[in-house]
Image (cartoon, rainbow, N blue to C red):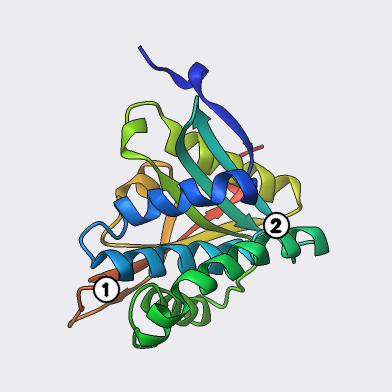
Amino acid sequence: MNTQQDVVIRAFDVEHDFDAAWNLMKSTWYRDVDPKIAAALSGDEICFYLVRATFAVSAWRDEDLLGFTFARHGLPSVVQQANWNRARTLVNQQYGEVLASIPADEGYQSEIDAYRQMLTQTQLKEDDSVLLLAVNPAARGLGLGKKLFTGALDYLRAAGAKSAHLVTDTDCDWSFYDHLGLTRLAERHNDSPTALQSDGYFLYGYNFEDDGR
């Protein structure tokens, strides 16, 4: 029987982890999309968040990637930025033409636009955020999503953040954040979603001063 004791959580290593993370995103978040577009968007989306991350970890069981999460407090170090940019170069080399053919408001860009609108609405900044959380369906029942997410929160708290926030969409298990006690701060609905867009987006927040730690 597999348990969390079988899982190793460590710093995200671009050389070792990126391809596996790319495949995980492609096969879960973009599973119903044309394969080339799925490969291009999933790789580009990981890079979009990774180049902003100051915290990145992955969870493994043997040779299987079970999940990963990125968070941001301040700006990435020079070393982090160089590592993350290597991944972006790889994606652009392989799928640059495909990405250029996708309309600017399609794919995850619609989520970014909604996110920034909600930040303006709530007067928050992009800092102190959980940028991305992805969990392999094979890890269901292990409590790994909660472990990765609370690890990101612990990092932000230790870094001096007073609160944290994240954006999610209706294609994800957004009730996960309700169950963890986060507050829904804002939402945006998409009345005419395309195949590469979600029906809606939610901004959740967590106040560290309220958890008594």
Answer with mark 1 or mark 2, whichever residue precedes in sequence.
Answer: 2
Residue 25 in which image quadrant: bottom left
Rendered location of residue 100, percent (x, y): 42, 86
Residue 174 in view here: no
Numbered label attached to residue 117: none
For label 1, count other residues whose C-alpha is less than 10 Å away and answer few (under 14), some (14-19) or many (20+).
some
The residue where tag 2 is placed is: 54
**Residue shown at 50%/24% (left/top)?**
62
Q: Nearer the viewer, residue 58 or 142?
A: 58
Looking at the image, residue 66 lies above or below residue 196: above
What type is the residue that disc 1 sits on? Leu
Q: Which residue is mark 1?
A: 196
Quadrant showing the N terminus: top left
Give the mark toward the camera: 1 or 2.
1
Residue under the point 56% across and 65% down = 90
**Vertically, is 190 above or below 128?**
below
